[in-house]
């Protein structure tokens, strides 16, 4: 009798599987939960007295359109529930983004991510438009003095950051010298008075952008009290740009993590204000905690939740990398200063029409992977990364470590430079410093291919650095030379072998080589039964070839 009842449950379960196939938006995790609930309901409906234990094994995730599985264990029977992954345009060999991972397992649902993303936005900017007054402190000496750029160029970048935000306008700007930027008001008494009067005389100003890496909580409070309006530093402004450009769960979670230090700073400011009013240290309803302690605890819980979700993302990224390595696809990370033309270059190298480059700062916030072919017909995966920027606190880089971790696991790094930019040398130094801080392996640092992009905008361009590859990604100039350089570097870094193999044409050898290696040339032999095939093949694939076809 019990066997019959379990068979009935099995029919319902397989009915649910069929339904899940038609529901592409179902995730594996939520499907499994619903199945367990449905099974429990059927047990109750059929009046089964035997308990129905279950356990869930880890999902089988195939990044290339495979199947995921969950296992539901019934007494004496095991049902394997397999849900097909959708073959979206983002799957290999086209574009692959973190959205694919969300289809595999909904580790945290959209509502939770959005709540974390919208909760306590630290900059207090909201969706308002601002008329901004930009202030650039020109440090005359000391460790914070910039030697590879000028105050005017730094001001131009600050203007570009503000103009990146839609409907934000720069109403005025000023460069003022300072000897000790660590002062709570940044400037000396005289220059601060000049600045305050100029801001007050400028009509319509709603915010001030202080072009420094990070304002201390004390400085931020002092300046806002003095001018009666919101004051941003580079950290808070860049975070707001990120916030407006964030589309995926991963980007939103990483931005939420990067905002934690700002939330802590704001919390300290609020507590100072409450203490001045005599209310900051009072205990709450006999809980034994002050208001500050409660808010600190909630902030820690929020940070832990974000880090837990990001750690799951990190594991999934590791799985994807393992699958790419298993398929012998070399990985080339394309990086550079923001708006240097990385996405335009990848589009030119791969012909991926889904890529839509934008002429703006931080247009790319998510790692995406795009397949392209080299002259030898070898397939490589180009990784598009987030753009870098100077004078950003290490906390912001750390929060995007799950994304930037892919760079450290590449076979090759291509560093794209906007050679037409007046600060191109300073930008190069900043990018290399960030890579060192990310602890990129020495083998990758020593094999970087430097690309001079936008040479069509430089009149009479002459290569200034040996080994650099001059190109124009937009005009598709110099791409053939770049592809050959990439191919040579990839073969060296991956240890792939270039060899000539003799194959039997009446066997599947040639077809196997086309699938598992990069076939460059095929020459028929005189006997019409064999051919000489020039290939580029990995040592592992060559081992499989010898074993499969018993080649000595």
Image (spheres, rainbow, N blue to C red):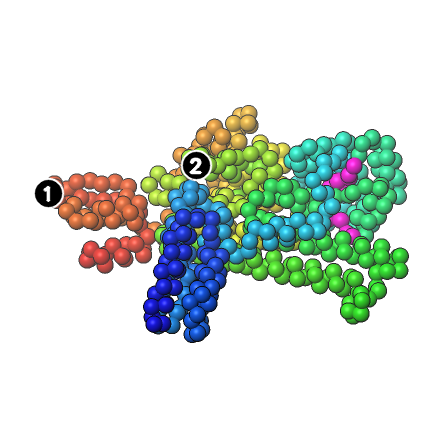
Q: Position of residue 336 (x, y in %)?
A: 55, 42
Within-10-Å neighbours for mark 1: few <14, some 14–19, many 20+: few
Within-10-Å neighbours for mark 2: few <14, some 14–19, many 20+: some
| Quadrant the N terminus occupies | bottom left
Q: Position of residue 81 (x, y in %)?
A: 38, 59
Q: Quick check: 210 left or right of 334?
A: right
Q: Quick check: 282 left or right of 44?
A: right
Q: Quick check: 100 left or right of 172?
A: left
Q: CA distance from mark 1 to mark 2?
A: 42 Å
Q: Position of residue 457 (x, y in %)?
A: 55, 27
Q: Position of residue 109 (x, y in %)?
A: 55, 53
Which of the labelled discs sits on residue 352, or is there none? 2
First in sequence, mark 1 or 2: give its number: 2
- Look at 43% across and 36% down and name the residue there: 352
- Residue position for label 1: 527
Quadrant of res 364 = top right
Q: Which residues are magenta?
A: 206-217
| Quadrant the C terminus occupies | bottom left
Quadrant of res 167 = top right
Circle 1 — which element?
Answer: loop
Circle 2 — which element?
Answer: loop
């Amino acid at each position: 009798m019990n066997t019959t009842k379990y068979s009935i449950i099995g029919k319902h379960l397989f009915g649910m599987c069929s339904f899940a196939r038609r529901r592409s938006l179902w995730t594996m995790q939520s499907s499994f939960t619903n199945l367990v609930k449905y099974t429990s309901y059927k047990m109750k409906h059929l009046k089964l007295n035997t308990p129905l234990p279950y356990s869930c094994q880890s999902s089988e995730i195939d990044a290339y359109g495979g199947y995921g599985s969950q296992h539901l264990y019934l007494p004496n029977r095991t049902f394997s529930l397999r849900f097909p992954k959708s073959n979206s345009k983002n799957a290999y060999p086209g574009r692959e983004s973190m959205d694919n991972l969300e289809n595999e397992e909904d580790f945290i649902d959209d509502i939770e991510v959005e709540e974390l993303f919208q909760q306590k936005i630290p900059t207090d900017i909201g969706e308002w438009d601002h008329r901004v007054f930009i202030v650039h402190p020109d440090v005359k000496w000391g460790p914070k003095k910039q030697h590879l750029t000028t105050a005017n160029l730094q001001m131009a970048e600050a203007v570009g950051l503000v103009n990146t935000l839609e409907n934000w306008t720069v109403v005025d700007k000023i460069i003022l010298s300072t000897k000790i930027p660590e002062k709570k008001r940044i400037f000396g008494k005289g220059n601060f008075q000049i600045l305050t009067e100029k801001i007050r005389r400028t009509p319509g100003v709603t915010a001030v952008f202080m072009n420094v890496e990070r304002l201390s909580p004390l400085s931020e409070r002092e300046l806002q009290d003095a001018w009666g309006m919101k004051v941003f530093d580079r950290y808070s402004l860049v975070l707001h740009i990120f916030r407006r450009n964030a589309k995926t769960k991963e980007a939103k979670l990483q931005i939420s993590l990067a905002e934690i230090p700002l939330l802590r700073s704001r919390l300290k400011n609020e507590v100072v204000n409450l203490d001045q009013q005599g209310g900051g240290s009072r205990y709450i309803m006999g809980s034994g905690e002050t208001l500050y302690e409660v808010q600190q605890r909630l902030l820690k819980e929020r940070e832990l939740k974000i880090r837990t979700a990001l750690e799951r993302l990190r594991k999934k990224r590791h799985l994807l990398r393992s699958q790419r390595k298993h398929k012998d696809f070399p990985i080339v990370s394309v990086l550079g200063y923001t708006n240097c033309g990385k996405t335009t270059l990848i589009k030119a190298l791969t012909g991926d029409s889904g890529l839509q480059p934008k002429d703006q700062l931080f247009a790319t916030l998510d790692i995406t992977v795009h397949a392209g072919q080299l002259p030898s017909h070898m397939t490589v995966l180009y990784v598009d990364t987030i753009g870098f920027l100077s004078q950003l606190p290490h906390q912001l880089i750390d929060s995007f470590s799950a994304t930037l971790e892919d760079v450290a696991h590449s076979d090759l790094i291509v560093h794209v430079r906007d050679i037409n930019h007046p600060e191109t040398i300073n930008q190069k130094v900043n990018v290399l410093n960030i890579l060192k801080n990310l602890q990129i392996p020495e083998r990758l640092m020593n094999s970087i291919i430097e690309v001079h992009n936008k040479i069509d905008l430089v009149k009479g361009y002459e290569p200034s650095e040996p080994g650099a590859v001059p190109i124009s990604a937009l005009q598709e100039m110099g791409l053939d030379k770049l592809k050959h350089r990439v191919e040579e570097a990839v073969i060296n870094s991956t240890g792939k072998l270039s060899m000539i193999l003799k194959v039997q044409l009446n066997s599947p050898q040639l077809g196997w080589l086309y699938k598992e290696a990069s076939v460059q040339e095929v020459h028929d032999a005189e006997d019409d039964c064999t051919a000489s095939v020039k290939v580029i093949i990995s040592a592992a694939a060559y081992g499989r070839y010898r074993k499969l076809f018993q080649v000595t």
